[in-house]
């Protein structure tokens, strides 16, 4: 899943900002930190200055869903406007146009959000991202567009600063900012209209799916720059992974997975075969709808900490005349020991739907 790779841009205040925004409607009460104050709380003076500058925009729009209130506080953009993002361990700051979005998340009944050191912190995760009209948010979101964030809690309110690639060149298409329940983009939370390119909230979604229109001047759109940006992303996704030195645990997993992987490549893997070597995690099971050749998915595996989202292609997973029970692997992951090995899968059903399930390594009977 190369599209899950993160790459953090570096930042220091050097170039002027290039965003121009239109007028804004809908204001929250002045009980929140401003984006500049949020950056100051994070000891990020350069970003604080950027948010206090003339090109930053204070949005202050609040939406309420379920038990939560989500407030889109503001946005800014520019080259090198962050004190802390460095390139690996070199200490060198990276160049690059980057966007920063400040948001506040709180409970509607006033119950304080858990502090970052509390045991309950993170048990109710939120995924924040920019989305671009005309581009499927399953594929283009803050994970695939080099996103990262910092957050803290003050007076019971969680403040999050999202960093992601600058997508100003898509202003003529339209840009959204969304916050949904979970740790990844949830395709059930929003609806993407392929014909119009519009992204809307799923009104029947049982969870948080706030969606704001980013008030950016459409004249800032640059089709040529947008095309170049997309080509660069695609080239990165298509690039082979860099070879890494494997541990004994990695080698053990690779050996155990060899048969499954070969069968998967030949599209001969079945649920019946998998059940001999692994145990299904029942809480992970969900039935998915096939949309043309695409199978969008999103999962959050609770206690195990496994989560993910994306789009798989039917013809990549299954043979042309695959029978019910045919299975495809979505990869595998472990945390250093084969006993922790987990294998996300999709299995074809009688009615044409697909069942997503995660399997766990099963020690062979002696």
Image (spheres, grey):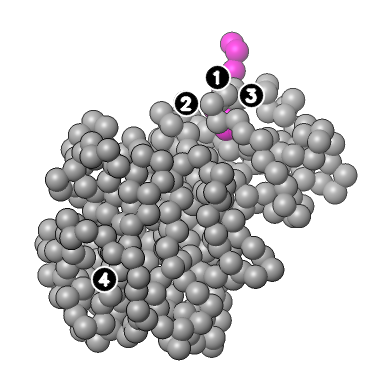
- Residue position for label 4: 58
- The secondary structure type at the circle numbered 2 is helix
Residue 53 included in the magenta stretch of the image: no
Mark 2 or mark 4, which is nearer the start of the sequence? Answer: 4
Q: Which mark is residue 339?
A: 2
Percent of width and height locating residue 12: 20, 76
Image height check: is 184 above or below 305?
Answer: below
> Which quarter of the picture shows residue 287?
top right
Q: Seen in the image, is 81 located left or right of residue 131?
A: left
> Which quarter of the picture shows residue 103?
bottom left
Spatial CA distance of label 4 from label 2 is 49 Å
- Contact, mark 3 vs mark 1 (Cβ under 8 Å): no
- The secondary structure type at the circle numbered 1 is loop
- Residue position for label 3: 277
Mark 2 or mark 3, which is nearer the start of the sequence? Answer: 3
Spatial CA distance of label 1 from label 2 is 8 Å
Image height check: is 124 above or below 49?
Answer: above
- The secondary structure type at the circle numbered 3 is helix
Q: Which mark is residue 363?
A: 1
Residue 359 included in the magenta stretch of the image: yes
- Contact, mark 1 vs mark 4 (Cβ under 8 Å): no
Spatial CA distance of label 3 from label 1 is 8 Å
- Contact, mark 1 vs mark 2 (Cβ under 8 Å): yes
Mark 4 or mark 1, which is nearer the start of the sequence? Answer: 4
| Residue found 55% across the figure and 59% down from its top | 200
Magenta-highlighted residues: 357-366
| Residue found 63% across the figure and 36% down from its top | 356
Which tag is nearer the camera, tag 1 or tag 4? 4
Q: Quick one: label 3, few (<14), some, or many (20+) residues within 10 Å?
A: some
Spatial CA distance of label 1 from label 4 is 56 Å
């Amino acid at each position: 899943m190369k599209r899950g790779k993160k790459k953090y841009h570096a930042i220091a205040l050097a170039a002027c900002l290039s965003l121009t925004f239109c007028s804004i409607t809908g204001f929250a009460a002045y009980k929140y930190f401003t984006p500049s104050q949020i950056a100051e709380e994070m000891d990020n003076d350069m970003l604080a200055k950027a948010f206090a500058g003339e090109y930053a925009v204070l949005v202050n729009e609040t939406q309420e869903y379920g038990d939560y209130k989500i407030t889109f506080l503001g946005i800014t953009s520019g080259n090198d406007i962050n004190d802390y993002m460095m390139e690996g361990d070199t200490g060198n700051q990276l160049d690059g146009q980057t966007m920063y979005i400040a948001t506040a998340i709180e409970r509607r009944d006033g119950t304080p959000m858990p502090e970052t050191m509390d045991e309950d912190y993170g048990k109710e995760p939120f995924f924040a991202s920019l989305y671009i009209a005309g581009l499927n948010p399953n594929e283009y979101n803050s994970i695939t567009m080099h996103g990262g964030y910092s957050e803290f809690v003050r007076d019971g309110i969680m403040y999050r600063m999202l960093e992601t690639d600058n997508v100003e060149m898509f202003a003529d298409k339209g840009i959204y900012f969304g916050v949904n329940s979970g740790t990844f983009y949830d395709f059930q939370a929003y609806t993407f209209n392929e014909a119009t390119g519009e992204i809307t909230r799923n009104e029947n979604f049982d969870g948080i799916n706030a969606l704001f229109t980013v008030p950016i001047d459409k004249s800032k759109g640059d089709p040529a720059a947008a095309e170049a940006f997309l080509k660069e992303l695609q080239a990165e996704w298509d690039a082979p992974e860099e070879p890494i030195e494997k541990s004994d645990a990695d080698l053990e997993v690779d050996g155990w997975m060899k048969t499954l992987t070969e069968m998967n490549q030949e599209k001969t893997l079945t649920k019946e075969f998998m059940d001999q070597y692994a145990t299904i995690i029942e809480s992970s099971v969900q039935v998915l709808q096939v949309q043309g050749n695409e199978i969008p998915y999103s999962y959050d595996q609770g206690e195990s900490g496994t989560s993910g989202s994306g789009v798989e292609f039917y013809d990549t997973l299954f043979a042309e005349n695959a029978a019910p029970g045919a299975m495809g692997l979505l990869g595998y992951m472990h945390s250093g020991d084969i006993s922790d090995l987990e294998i996300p899968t999709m299995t074809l059903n009688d009615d044409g739907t697909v069942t997503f399930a995660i399997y766990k390594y099963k020690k062979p009977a002696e």
